[in-house]
Structures are given as C-alpha cells and as structure tokens.
Image (cartoon, rainbow, N blue to C red):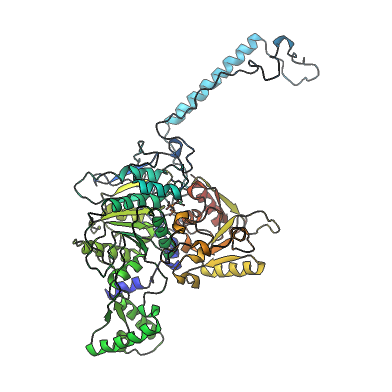
Amino acid sequence: MLSCSLRAARLSAELSERCLHSSASLNAQPRTKKGGRKPGLTNSPSRTRLVDNLKPKPGSGGRLEVAPKPNRFSSVKGKSKAPGSTSTPPPGPAFTRDSVPHEGRAPIDESSRPTRRPKTDLEDIPPIPTTSQAHNLKSWASRAHEERVEKRQAARKLPRKPPVDPLGNEFSDAATKTELSDELPTEFASPPLLPGLLTCLKEVIPPKAKPTPIQALSLKHLFTRKESQDPWRQVLLASETGSGKTTAYLLPMLQDLKQTELSARPAGSQRLMQPRALVLAPTHELSRQLASSAKALLHISKLRVLCASRANAPSNPRASGTAAKMASDMAAFSNAGEAGSEFQVRQSTERARAVDVMVGTPNKVLEMTRGRGWNWDERLEAKLQKEASMGRDVDLDATRKSFYTEAPEMGLANVEWVVVDEADVMFDPDFQEYTRMLLADIALARGVSVPFDPTSDLNPLGSETPNAPINYPFNLILTSATIPSSLASYIDTTHPTMTRLASPHLHHLPKSLKPEYDSLRGKDGQRGHLSKVLIFCNKRSKVADLSEFLEEKGIKHVALAGGAEARKRGSNHHLDGFLRVKTKALAIPTSESGVTPAGALPPLADAKDPRKTPHVLLTTSLLSRGLDFAPDIKHVFIVDEPRNMIDFLHRAGRAGRAGEKGRVVVFGKMEGRGSALAKDVRKKVGALKA
Ligand SMILES: Nc1ncnc2c1ncn2[C@@H]1O[C@H](COP(=O)(O)OP(=O)(O)OP(=O)(O)O)[C@@H](O)[C@H]1O
C-alpha cells in the first residue's frame, strides 16, 4: 500500500501539467529504427493511439450507436436538416433563359438576335462541322465515353490499394463497421425533459438550438427505463470537442436525481455530506466550470451542487490551517505521542451541508471521503526519501507523529451516478489508481466489494490475466473527445456491456475550426484585428520565455502553467475574461462554484480593450482539457509541434466550440532542414478535418 500510494502521492492534489504532458507525450507504441511499429505489438493498447472504432467485442453484450452525419441531422447551429426530412430542395418554377420577360424588358425576338460573326481572318479556328462531320464527332464522343466506362469497371474489379493514412500511428487499425442510428430526437422537449430543466437549458444555450448528435443520443438512451435486470447503466459518451457532452450527461443525471429525490435513501450520518452524484474531472479549473454548468441548469429544479475543488493547496491539512488551528494541532500531536498512535484523526465539529451533486478531482473527493491527510504514509515516505537524498538522518517516530488525518466530511453510500469526465486522462496510468480507488470505495460504501489492486496495470498484457468485468452498483458515465486504444481496451475487458454512444465526427476537428500553418519566422509589422488568443506551449519554461517576450512588447497577457500562484486561490478568477460564463449561474455567485460574480468583471468597454484587459492566455496542456472557453477566443496558437494527435485535438478544441468559427494555427519550420516534423504534423492535422 505504502509504495503504491507513494506513486499516487507524487501526482499531487490535482492533475498537474507534468501529468497532462506525460499522458500526451508517452508513446506506448514501440518503434523500429525506421519508424515502423515493432512486429507483434501492433495491437497492444496505447495511450496515444486513437481507436477508429468503438465497436464492442462480439457476444460481449455491449452496444455501439453512432449518430448520423450532420448533413442528415441538425447541427449545433441547427442549420442542417432533421432526419426524415427530404434532402432535395422543393422544386422551383421551370425557368428557361429569356422565356420569361425581365421586368421592364421586352422578350427577345429570336429573329433580331445578332448572327455569329463569319470566320474571316482567324485561320486557326477549325471550321464549323457539317451535319455528317457532327455525326462522326458525336459517335466518337460516345465511343470514348464507353471506353472510359469500361476502364472504370475494370479498375473496380482490381484489388484496391489501401490509402496512405497519415494518422496510421494515431488511429488503431482494427476497422470494422459501425452501427448508425437514424431515429434520434431533433428537439429538446418536455417530455422527456422536466419543464424546469428545459427552461434553464434554453437560458444557457441559444434558444433555438437543436440537440447536438451526442445530446440526441443521450436523449434517446438515457431518459428511457433500462430494459435489462441490472438497474445501473454503464455508458460511454464520445464526441469531438465543444459538442456539448457536458449537457449530454448532466441532463439525464440531474433529471433522474430530481425525479427520485423523494424516494432517495435517507442520509446516513448527519455529520457527513451524502451526495447522490459525483462528477470527476482532472483539473480544479474544469471541476469549477462543470459545477457552475450544473448550477446553471438547476435554478428552477433546486438541486444542490458543490465543487470539492475549493483550492489547489496540497493535501496536507497543516498547510491550510490558521495559527489557532496550528496551536491545537500541536496539542493533538503531543497527545498522539502519549497514546503511541501513528497518526491523529481530527474530528470535524461542523455540521455537513446538504448536497446532491459533488464535483471535483478524484484526489479532492478522496480527501473528503477518507479524511484530509488520509494518505499520510505517502507523504511520510516522500519526506523520508527527501531527507535521505540530502544525507540527513531522520527520526522516524518523530516524523511520523507530525502527520495526521482529519475526519471524513463526505459519505458515499448514497451515490447513484458517477461521471468520469475526460475519461482517457482519468484512466491514464498516472491517474487510474485514484480514479479506480474512488470507484471501489463508492461500491464498497454501497455494499458491493469490487476487486481493486492499486498496483495492477490497467491493461495487463497477455490474455491470461485480463481484468475481470466489474458491475458497479451505480450509474457510470465515461466521457471524452478522444478514446485511445488503452481506454477502449480497458472498457472491453472491465465494462464489456457498456453502451458506447458516439458522434459521427469523433476524433476529428469540429467543422467550424479551421487549421492553419505558419512558419516560425513570423511576419513583422503585420497587425490586424485579432480575437482573444490562447497560446499552447509544451513546457513551462517556454511559457515563461514567451511571457517575458510579451511583457517586453507591452502586450497584456496571462501566463498559467502548473505551479502558478494564481491557481492556488480556489476560484477560476485567474481565467476571468477567457472562460465562457453562463448567464444564469452569474446570478448565484458562490466561492465554491468558481462562478465569476458579476461585480468582479471589468466594464464592457475595458474588457474589449487589449490595452486594459489581457487578450492573450499563455499555457501548457494543463488547460487543454474540457474547459469551455469564451466564444471571443477565436484563435488557438500551437507554438510547439504537438506530441501526438490526442494532445492536438484537445488544444485545438478550445476554439471553434458549439459551432462558433475558430482557427487553430500550428507553428513550425515548414522549409529546409528540420522541417520534416512540421510537415508530418501538417499531414496529420489535415487528416483530422471533419
Ligand atoms: N445543443 C447545443 N446548441 C448550442 N450550444 C450548445 C448545445 N449544447 C451545448 N452547447 C454549448 O456548447 C459549449 C460546449 O459544450 P461542452 O463544454 O459541453 O463541450 P464538450 O463536448 O464537453 O467539449 P470538450 O470535449 O472540450 O470538453 C457550451 O458552451 C455549451 O453551453
């Protein structure tokens, strides 16, 4: 336990930049010297190779449904047609040239048309064919046409050469056909939605907006009663960035919580919060934004949402204490010493607040359920290692006594819904221990013990030791815009019956997002109107360098990387002006939700002025996941070559959301020595276009 949890402790209290980077940079696919894949390992699950198909294994009991392509379905902006409607336009009036007089003009008299100018001096123009010549020409043309048809038919019979796929290393090669769905809801309506939810939804999305494909699938599948005996659902929601996945899982979850509110199990301990739903996200910023999205849907239905990510402080209870608390802590330590116990459990006297939905990172939620400081042994081990590396002797007993854990604030027995947002990161080797530990804790609190070994690999290699299927006693929704083969393989073995709902553009850029390429040289002196800009770098040091450069140029900006002080404040104010703000949520400002109180925003004129309000946000992959950036961020700049297409899709997807127009500019050396990488990226990005 000690060593396994040590690894988890190193992850710190949240998804750090390092973790996002490592998940993006590691390429689990071993290579030969020439760049090809090593034989025999082509099918081993990879964290950076996207699957091109989510079809469950035959006979597994799972199912896949893919929404039809938007030309047969309503898009976010509702421009295209609903299924069932005809794709051909209604026939217009017959119209032949000049047969209808134009207004104010007489119909043309054929006899008064000017005759063709007779050929005189243009000797090189062939003579107009006579009737028999024209006949020959016609038969020649038809013979040529027949020959072409024959050639084409012969070509069709030849075995086809596989097209060169620039994403060969990113997309898995296990292609099979997908099941397309045709009968999908084309409106948000009541029913299936409760009127209160529908009213709130129409306030946060454009009033005439139609369900996006993933939302239509959710409306179809997650609002009906489950037919099988097992009352709990296991669902994967997979669709491109900015396609409304948050709404797709919040609506069915909140509606179910509301409908079963009265019949819900009575809370166990009065002292503990007993949420009925958990939404897990990899970063504090995303947790806060998701909590505010849920609140914005609930001001009529009145369910209570709380964000666990109140601060980015480390999981050391001492770090957050006041002076008085420190003093009482010291007393507690000495008591602990007398009792000879290894660590002290502090009892919270606060009465818990009622909460229906808890949103947070797995680590923060574990702190609340196991007690802040629960992983004291990891910290102890880390401290011992640090002291040893500095060559100091450590008094083990004294050091041990300096750790303690607080009493839990939250119980898990009532949890009926668990959403794992950005599931590929949450089941990434860096994070899967905490995620799976929490899922196992919830199951246990609900009376079901599921196998969980924190040291076990998510995808053990070899067919002799596959993960045993798990049926958690709660609804489980996994969601992401990218499904790497490691996650697909985990789902296949651990949740074989999972329903996979996917949009037709999964693993592509949103249609409204246009990729562009630029050389590193830049074009000095060109200044046009630029929207707010998001700049992604691969390393913190690059963020710092660029920040210095912008500083010198007098360009107002915000630079945010993993260790930034601004991230420790427990709110999303450091992203003010960049994140999308939901209007109704503004009316209920709370410290936990991270919702920006209206008063904190600069006046509109100042907000639009780049000299007064920062228009540039510099960051790493840390902010590339899930965050719903404001529509006035129309440009994403990727200044370092993306390490793989998963990383690229998420970074790029911060613009062009919900059908808004956006551009992603990839910088790279496009000519001369060292340009091969940029050219390769360009090819791959081109293949991602929807
Ligand atoms: N049907 C809809 N029509 C128009 N806008 C919508 C619709 N549904 C959601 N939106 C808006 O689209 C934006 C993006 O939604 P959301 O953040 O849920 O995308 P996502 O699929 O979760 O993206 P990511 O993969 O980046 O997390 C939000 O501002 C949301 O309010």
The image shows residue 70, relative to residue 533, as above or below, that is: above
Q: Position of residue 300 (x, y in %)?
A: 37, 52
The image shows residue 662, relative to residue 109, as above or below, that is: below
What residue is rendered at 43% in x and 45% in y? 505
What residue is rendered at 33% in x and 81% in y? 380
Q: Quadrant of residue 103?
A: top right
Query: Could you say which is closer to the camera, residue 358 or residue 648?
Result: 358
Q: Is residue 337 left or right of residue 12?
A: left
Q: Position of residue 404 (x, y in %)?
A: 30, 80
Q: Quadrant of residue 523?
A: bottom right
Q: Is residue 528 left or right of residue 401?
A: right
Q: Is residue 127 left or right of residue 676?
A: right
Q: Is residue 197 left or right of residue 680?
A: left
What residue is rendered at 62% in x and 58% in y? 605
Query: Could you say which is closer to the camera, residue 214 or residue 61?
Result: 214
The image shows residue 270, relative to residue 329, as above or below, that is: above
Q: Position of residue 606 (x, y in %)?
A: 61, 61
The image shows residue 150, relative to residue 671, as above or below, that is: above
Q: Quadrant of the N terminus?
A: bottom left
